Amino acid sequence: MRFKTPVLKKDQPDDSYKFRALPEPSGKYPYHLSLKDVIPSIGDNKITFHMVGDTGSIRSPDFQKTVAGELIKQYQEADSKGDQPQFLYHLGDIVYNHGEATQYQRQFFDPYKLYPGPIFAIPGNHDSDVNPDAITPYNTLEPFITVFCDTTPHTVAFSGGSERKSMVQPNIYWTLKAPLANIIGMYSNIPKFGVVTDEQRDWLKEELKAANAERPGKALIICIHHAPYTADINHGSSIPMITLLESVFEETGIRPDIVFSGHVHNYQHFIRRYSEGPSVHFIVAGGGGYDELHPIAATDDNRFTNDYPNFNDVELLGYCDDKHGFLKVTLERTQKGLTLSGNYYAVTHRDTNKSDFTATLEDTFILEIL
């Protein structure tokens, strides 16, 4: 029997000492980037994009290459322009283990060389860490900022000559202003369960208020690398992230439609039901390529517990913990309102070199945003 609720992993050491101060933003407060500035042709009534986390790999690059290949194939072989993904949103952990510039070509630029669309990202804990033994000293997130937080697009010196230019995100935490959604991207630092500064917490509150004012015409989406709710055996749920989000929701009286995370190397779909107001969906999509996957905990495994306030209000609706994969998300305006749908595609670990191989649909969710 597997848990159907989030779990906590018992007896976890405190690694908050790994926290690193945030670098200076490259853009101006409140750190907004208009999707139309990057993709001028983006539609006002339908948007489709990919989402994935934890794609980097230091030991076995095969899974990362397979996932990237399927993302590229899905982009190129879409039946219609409306179904074609227009960009990729990365949920963090692009480069293992320490976010080094020397690893970006092998772990990012080469695998995604043929991906036709722009790639946006929030940093993961591994992107933020610093290798103390690096030949060339560097500061936390310095390579990430070069790749994703430039002021104008440039060729990245350590990309191996890639044609993919640097992205122009205004900060490591920022909001993507899209025609059908406000996508708030958070930064949760290096410790295993994440840390968010008071300054960023205040920013999140203001972003929720601003995004809420644009409802119901736009979906409200939060992305944060460390998963608040998870039932896996490697990490378990993050009390700091749960405390952060739920307290901010309560203080503002505003909840997002959905929260996307990585960090855990699998796919999970949770729903949290509240006594008042609509439910919130929490999606983990961290099976993007790192070779080690994280199984869902068994109920008889005494290393884990689900004895925590409000876990009874959170239900695991679906998961895929034995295959790598990625999300395809669609936002579409209909006569009834706005629909957000997600399809999780997985790749098997067999026969992935066959020319006729195609990722399989493992899970689907649909949110009606009225």
Image (cartoon, grey):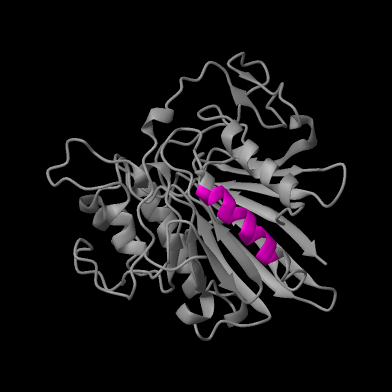
- In the rendered image of this protein, does residue 127 appear above or below residue 312? below
Magenta segment, prevailing SS (helix, strand or loop): helix
- In the rendered image of this protein, does residue 308 appear above or below residue 365? above
Residue 237 visible in the picture: no
Give the residue drawn at x 49%, y 53%. Answer: 91
Q: Residue furthest bottom?
A: 41
Residue 280 visible in the picture: yes
Residue 80 horizontal/vertical position (percent): 60, 80
Depth order, front residue of 246/59: 246
Count how many numbered circles sit on residues in the image: 0
Depth order, front residue of 311/319: 311
Depth order, front residue of 165/189: 189
Residue 189, picture quadrant: top left
Residue 66, picture quadrant: bottom left
- In the rendered image of this protein, does residue 67 appear above or below residue 286? below
Magenta region includes residue 187: no
Quadrant showing the N terminus: top right
Magenta region includes residue 210: yes
Residue 366 horizontal/vertical position (percent): 74, 59
The magenta region covers 199-211
Quadrant showing the C terminus: bottom right
Residue 227 horizontal/vertical position (percent): 57, 41
